[in-house]
Image (tube, helix red, strand yellow):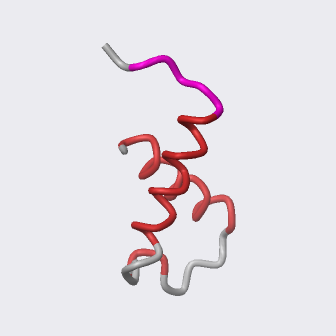
Amino acid sequence: MKPKLTIARLKKSAKEFCEIESTYRNKDLYGVTDGKAIGTYIEHKFQKL
């Protein structure tokens, strides 16, 4: 069972996710100009965390 989502846990998870994502180059996003597609891609990665 997943722990209850709180604002503090969401902030902590988001910070950890951003730190991980910023350490490598994501070749899947090079040349993509559609902001919605990029947002959806990142959102799905975050949800899998």
Relative vertical location of residue 24 with respect to residue 4 in this rendering, above or below: below
Relative vertical location of residue 16 with respect to residue 28 in this rendering, above or below: above
Magenta: main secondary structure equals loop
27 lies left or right of 9? left
Count the marks: how many?
0
Query: Quarter-wise, where is residue 5 in the image?
Result: top right
Q: Is residue 22 magenta?
A: no
Q: Which residues are magenta?
A: 3-7
Q: Nearer the viewer, residue 48 or 11?
A: 11
Q: Residue 18, position in %: x, y?
A: 51, 63
- Residue name at image x 42 percent, y 52 percent: 45
Q: Residue 19, position in %: x, y?
A: 46, 67
Q: Nearer the viewer, residue 34 or 13?
A: 13
- Residue farthest top in this picture: 1
- Residue farthest right in this picture: 35
Q: Residue 20, position in %: x, y?
A: 40, 66
11 lies left or right of 3? right
Relative vertical location of residue 33 with respect to residue 6 in this rendering, above or below: below
Relative vertical location of residue 3 with respect to residue 19 in this rendering, above or below: above
- Residue name at image x 31 percent, y 13 percent: 1
- Residue name at image x 53 percent, y 46 percent: 12
- Residue name at image x 65 percent, y 78 percent: 33
Q: Quadrant of the C terminus?
A: top left
Q: Residue 38, position in %: x, y?
A: 58, 64
30 lies left or right of 7? left
